[in-house]
Image (cartoon, coloured by chain):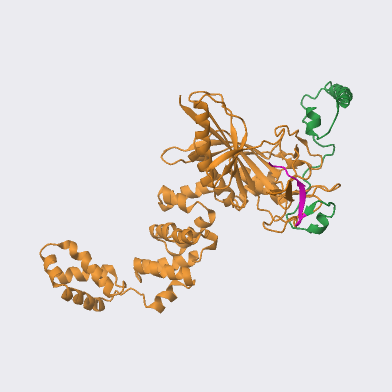
Chain colours: A orange, B green
């Protein structure tokens, strides 16, 4: 029997506000334990939550950018459960009336010509819980409530994905969107973008969903892919041997490359939601919505299409260059200096990204600014330097941070295009290699590149290859 | 017993019987509300007609870890100390 996989994803996106969702405590990462707390997020009696306007706006933007219906009125509910990192014994969330519903993303999966539409069930706002660490030797846990009250949106997809690759494609797109919107820093390791995956199998052709398991602790795209893959294999082997899948939560262990069952939270599914009387409804009027719509940036899919249509980029290049808003901005800033699209594309997509990868840097921390690279490419375009020298100058720029022009002047790297100067070099090469000259004249025209190499070596790579070719053809002819 | 469990309440058999009767009365009372015709009336969550009570996104003062933890004896290195939750 063949099985098909059904995957639904729940993504928690941490909103990039300065303060928490219901109090004015800082959301900055890395402070000492419980340093960023106040009566509201410590749940001291008598304290009252007040909604952060910016968090509401960021959530609304995410709703608009994912083709969801933006609900004019949404409300906050209490989700009740007992856990020490949740000091109120309930989490403020949105249940009956979330801020957004019924959206979708169209994803591209390698090797398939058409896009696939993945439904988004809902997007709701909620507060994050604190962090507990468990003592390995004593029967105690340590609780830090700095993260309690950090604003989140939870994006719940329909169970529309049928492979790990589709799940990752969906996540990458959602990740790019929230980064473009500037509502989330997208840092998966610090937990700003967290994903839980619901995975189940069913016999091919069956319409009823099988029993699912929920995978947690997936903090990189690579782990998500691996964990889902592992889960599919695990469920398949259970089903094939006639076993039953137990509905449970499983944690991914990225060191052992396997998942293990997490003891399920007691009565985890009886949350007894009810409207939070402390928080009044959020109502978005038309003016406010118009304002938000007006300020939406060009989204990754649209920018990618524009790069392909108006700049003539190939799909792969356009995808690479629009993967983050900063990189796309960088590319466009580069184009302002050097209008050769192909040149800018290969330099940004190959050389710049190669440099950043090698150094483990993000585009925001690039040692070579877009303007500086653009200037280098301008010099290359004008023929002042050749490609090989440009690469050398680029490496120097990355190390020293100096502009291309200064490096070229200081190191005397300007391309030699003066034919009288080059003629002497070509003459010398021909004199030193009489046998090859003879062979060339006898028809071995492939030796042209041999001579070219010798001239380049003699001129330390500074010769203008076009001029050298002309000289060689003339002097050998 | 399920409801008591969710609320972390300890009850013996006698309590259960008494509570069951009382809860039954409460539920029956709530049922009388069902007699009201609510056709076309949107569900309300608040008694006041107030919306959009919001604050600007600015960082204010923190309580500080010393005051924040002053209400408990169970603390260590700036953390609240609780019985272990995960095995």
The percent coordinates of residue A356 (x first, y second) are 48, 60
The percent coordinates of residue A246 (x first, y second) are 60, 29
Position above or below: A35 against A274: below
Nearest the viewer among A331 and A9 is A9
Q: In the rendered picture of this protein, how many numbered marks are placed on residues?
A: 0
Please give the name of the residue rendered at 67% of the width and 46% of the height, measured from the top-left corner: A152
Position above or below: B43 against A252: above
Q: Is residue B83 magenta?
A: yes
The percent coordinates of residue A59 (x first, y second) are 66, 46
Nearest the viewer among A100 and A149 is A149
Please give the name of the residue rendered at 78% of the width and 41% of the height, measured from the top-left corner: A89
Nearest the viewer among A255 and A151 is A255
Q: Is residue A14 visible from the viewing direction of this image?
A: yes
Left or right, B20 with respect to A304, comes to: right
Left or right, A119 with respect to A18, comes to: left
Q: Quadrant of the image for the C terminus of chain A? A: bottom left
Please give the name of the residue rendered at 43% of the width and 41% of the height, measured from the top-left corner: A110
Q: Is residue A309 magenta?
A: no
- Start-end of magenta stretch: B76-87
Position above or below: A207 against A377: above
Left or right, A207 with respect to B43, comes to: left
């Amino acid at each position: 029997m063949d099985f098909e996989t059904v995957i639904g994803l729940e993504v928690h996106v941490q909103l990039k506000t300065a303060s928490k969702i219901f109090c004015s405590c800082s959301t900055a990462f890395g402070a000492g334990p419980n340093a960023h707390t106040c009566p509201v997020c410590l749940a001291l009696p008598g304290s009252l939550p007040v909604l952060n306007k910016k968090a509401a706006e960021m959530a609304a933007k995410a709703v608009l950018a994912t083709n969801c219906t933006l609900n004019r009125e949404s409300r906050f509910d209490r989700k009740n459960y007992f856990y020490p990192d949740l000091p109120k014994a309930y989490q403020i969330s949105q249940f009956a009336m979330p801020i957004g519903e019924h959206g979708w993303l169209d994803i591209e999966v390698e090797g398939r010509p058409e896009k696939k539409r993945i439904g988004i069930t809902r997007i709701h706002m909620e507060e994050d819980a604190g962090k507990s660490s468990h003592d390995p030797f004593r029967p105690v846990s340590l609780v830090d409530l700095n993260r309690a009250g950090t604003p989140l949106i939870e994006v719940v997809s329909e169970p529309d994905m049928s492979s790990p690759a589709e799940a990752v494609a969906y996540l990458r797109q959602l990740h790019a969107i929230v980064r473009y919107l500037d509502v989330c820093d997208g840092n998966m390791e610090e937990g700003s973008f967290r994903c839980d995956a619901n995975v189940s199998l069913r016999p091919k052709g069956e319409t009823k969903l099988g029993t699912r398991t929920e995978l947690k602790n997936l903090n990189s795209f690579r782990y998500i892919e691996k964990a889902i893959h592992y889960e599919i294999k695990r469920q398949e082997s259970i089903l094939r041997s006639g076993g039953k899948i137990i509905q449970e939560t499983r944690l991914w262990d990225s060191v052992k490359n396997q998942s293990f069952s997490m003891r399920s939270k007691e009565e985890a599914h009886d949350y007894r939601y009810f409207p939070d009387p402390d928080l009044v409804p959020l109502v978005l009027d038309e003016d406010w919505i118009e304002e938000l719509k007006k300020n939406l940036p060009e989204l990754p899919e649209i920018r990618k299409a524009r790069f392909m249509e108006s700049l003539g980029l190939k799909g792969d290049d356009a995808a690479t260059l629009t993967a983050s808003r900063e990189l796309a901005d960088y590319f466009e800033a580069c184009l302002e200096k050097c209008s050769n699209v192909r040149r800018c594309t290969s330099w940004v997509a190959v050389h710049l990204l190669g440099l950043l990868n090698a150094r483990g840097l993000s585009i925001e921390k690039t040692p070579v600014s877009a303007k500086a690279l653009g200037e280098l490419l301008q010099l290359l375009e004008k023929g002042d330097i050749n490609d090989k020298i440009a690469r050398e100058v680029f490496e120097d720029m990355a190390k020293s941070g100096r502009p291309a022009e200064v490096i070229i002047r200081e190191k005397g790297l300007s391309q030699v295009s003066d034919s009288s100067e080059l003629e002497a070099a070509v003459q010398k090469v021909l004199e030193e290699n009489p046998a090859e000259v003879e062979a060339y004249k006898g028809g071995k025209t492939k030796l042209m590149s041999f001579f070219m190499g010798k001239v380049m070596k003699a001129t330390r790579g500074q010769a203008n290859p076009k001029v050298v070719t002309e000289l060689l053809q003339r002097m050998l002819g | 017993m399920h409801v008591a469990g969710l609320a972390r309440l300890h009850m013996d058999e006698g309590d259960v019987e008494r509570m069951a009767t009382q809860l039954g009365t409460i539920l029956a009372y709530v049922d009388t509300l069902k007699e009201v015709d609510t056709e076309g009336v949107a569900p309300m969550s608040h008694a006041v007609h107030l919306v959009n009570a919001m604050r600007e996104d600015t960082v204010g003062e923190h309580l500080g870890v010393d005051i924040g933890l002053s209400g408990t004896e169970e603390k260590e290195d700036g953390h609240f100390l609780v019985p272990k939750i995960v095995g």
